Amino acid sequence: MINTALITGASTGIGLEFAKIFAKENYDLILVSRNEKKLNEIKNSIEKDYRVKVKIIPKDLAEKNSAFEIYDEICKENLKVDVLINNAGFGALGNFEKIDWKTQADMLEVNITALTYLTHLFLKHMKERGEGKILNVASTAAFQPGPLMAVYYATKAYVLSFSLALAEETKNSNVTVTVLCPGPTTTEFQERAGMKQTKIMRLMKFLPADYVANYGFKALMKSKRLAIPGWLNKISVSMVKFLPQNFIVKIIKYLKSH
């Protein structure tokens, strides 16, 4: 029987690389993104290169009912989701009070609410079947506060905490939960967040999106709870535990400045 992977944020970056990996592994795909044109291009390309079926669901996860609408459409077509990849997410750079509220509210909706709701909806089915895998994409940003990206860092801290808690809840079942925490990665994230001219772009080493996705896939298949790709990212996360927080937030603010 062919398994199916549902991937959000699948039109670019890490999400797109996940789609390619799962196609190579002979998974049928359900791809979610706001960009319908790009999703159609990916669908045509993957179905041409691999013997898998690709269903696309153009949906903006910032819209309040989007998670349930995705779930409802999948259920109506009697599709089974064996792997859920909650990859969609975005950030915004600037002082908290200067970033418009719609952007902040959309970030909370995409990064937290939609991810949590999709997990809630599909985890039930996985537990009933007695198998399934969930991967939530957080960030190394999850391990400390982030001045100039306060809401984004806080949302990723939520994803990390939520995922590790679920991993413990499901440990005696055949359902596993993995949280992937990439550091700086070469995607469209930086441009959308307004980070192109910041010091982090000049000073930090960025990992390729395909490397991060491959690392996450291997961790997921091994049922690891926490996956941090790149040795520099592992070191930086470890250092956070020992350095004073007021020093850490100063460094983060410096890296996010122009």
Image: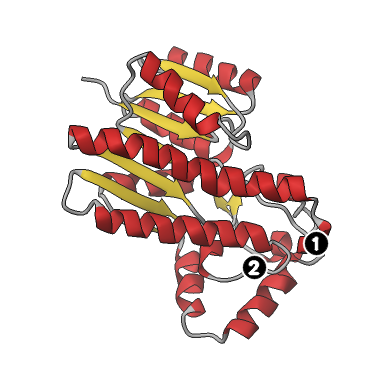
Which residue is painted at 45% across and 36% down in the image? Answer: 18
Report the front residue among 242 and 172: 172
Q: Earlier in the sequence, mark 1 or mark 2?
A: 1
Does any portion of residue 210 appear in the rendered image?
no
Name the spot of residue 111 as percent of width and height, x first: 56, 47
**Quadrant where the C terminus lies?**
bottom right
The disc labelled 2 sits on which kind of residue?
Answer: Gly
Residue 97, labelled with which disc? 1
Residue 1, labelled with which disc? none
Which residue is painted at 49% across and 36% down in the image? Answer: 17
Q: Is residue 172 left or right of residue 152?
A: left
User: Dot 2 lies on which element?
Assistant: loop
Q: Is residue 171 left or right of residue 38?
A: left
The disc labelled 1 sits on which kind of residue?
Answer: Glu
Residue tagged by mark 2? 146
Does any portion of residue 25 appear in the rendered image?
yes
Above or below 254: residue 71:
above
Name the spot of residue 135 as percent of width and height, x first: 39, 45
Report the front residue among 64 and 47: 64
**Quadrant where the N terminus lies?**
top left
Q: Quadrant of residue 153?
A: bottom right
